[in-house]
Amino acid sequence: MMLARDIATEGEFDVRIRKIRAETSEIRSFELEAVNGQLLPPFQAGAHISVTPFPGVTRHYSLVNDPADRSRYLIGVKRELSGRGGSSAMHTQLQEGGTVRIGTPRNNFALRPEGEGRRLLLAGGIGVTPLLSMAQMLASEGQEFELHYFARSNAEVAFRDLILESDWSHRVAYHYGLGPPLLTEVLQDILSGGGHSVYLCGPNPFMDVVRHCAETTGWSDDKIILEHFSAEVPVLTPGEGEFVVRLAKSGIELVIPSDRTIIEVMREAGVEIKTSCEQGVCGTCISEVVEGEVEHHDLFLSPEEQDSGRLIMPCVSRCTSRLLVLNI
Ligand code: FES
């Protein structure tokens, strides 16, 4: 018997499209598998992958499946007709049996460690995708959770079969077509009583309402973990000597002009970050790099730390790639 082996690749690699399925009129799911029967790289619940349906177009999609199942990656793609064409390309260019280039999974939306109390998973529309992976993980660990799925209507519910066939389907509540003030009432009801943590993913207006309701029902900010999805936001185009900084926790993107520091632009945009010397010496502003090529100008990091590409002092250092993603 041949044993499945891990894909050794880090970075980008090709996968085969095993199955494409219409989940709703606007959402398709794509089941991706390794081309040679290998196991795919491991991932945590909440992780996402990059997908390049054709050269020059790359989008990020959350993984839906159970992290224990490394025979496939399952993603859901909503076709955004007002977007930049990435989701349309996914819907129209990709065929079952074909291949597509993806990146190894990354996670900016990880589950917090075990602890007492219920986890509330609150999904708005296609924002359900990372929360489904979390639900499978929490169920397999025997942890207490509720998944609340807000959709425009019954017909807009994606991954219905995955939920119905699971042994945790009784923990899923569906809420259809709610707008304010009813949405607020329902959320306050769900959120009252506290718990371990709230995981939230959906359109920004939905997330704003949830955050407001969480605040008014006594949840502290550190218990609210959220992921913005706006894969089709307009592309910021940096000019010569400029680059774009994306703040992974909020999804905020900022253009850093050639004559301004990252810190200056962040401050102007209302993003708080502690600084002291602002000369790359003291270490106060040290930040974690998720993606991008750093051009170090500081005197604080060791040569090894600089070479790792994982840390940056944003008061002085810059980026040589178009995009720098910081874990802020
Ligand atoms: S503020 Fe001192 S190193 Fe950046």
Image (cartoon, rainbow, N blue to C red):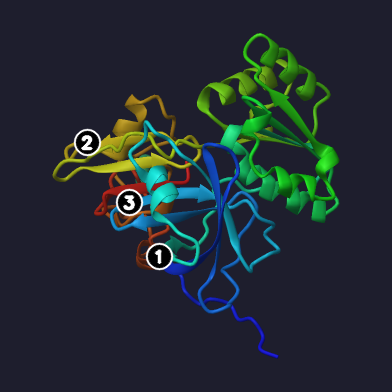
Residue sitting nearer the eye, 2 or 109: 2
Q: Are marks 1 and 3 in contact (CB under 8 Å)?
A: no
Q: Secondary structure at mark 3?
A: strand
Tell which circle, 1 or 3, labels the residue nearer the N-terminal end: 3
Residue where numbered disc 2 is placed: 260
Residue where numbered disc 1 is placed: 308
Residue 282 visible: no
What kind of residue is marked 3?
Answer: Val
Q: Measured along the vertical axis of the image, is residue 83 above or below residue 241?
A: above
Residue sitting nearer the eye, 151 or 272: 151
Crowding at dot 3, Cα within 10 Å, few <14 / some 14-19 / many 20+, comes out as: some
Depth check, mark 1 against mark 3: the one in front is: 3
Q: Position of residue 314 (x, y in %)?
A: 34, 44
Q: Residue furthest bottom?
A: 1
Instruction: Give the CA separation, mark 1 to mark 3.
Output: 27 Å
Q: Is residue 135 left or right of residue 292?
A: right
Crowding at dot 2, Cα within 10 Å, few <14 / some 14-19 / many 20+, comes out as: some
Q: Are marks 2 and 1 in contact (CB under 8 Å)?
A: no
Q: Position of residue 43 (x, y in %)?
A: 60, 60
Quadrant field for ligand 1: top left
Tell which circle, 2 or 3, labels the residue nearer the N-terminal end: 3
Residue where numbered disc 3 is placed: 57
Q: Is residue 95 left or right of residue 186?
A: left
At 50% across and 37% down in the image, what residue appears? 229
Instruction: Give the CA separation, mark 2 to mark 1.
Output: 25 Å
Quadrant in which residue 315 is drawn: top left
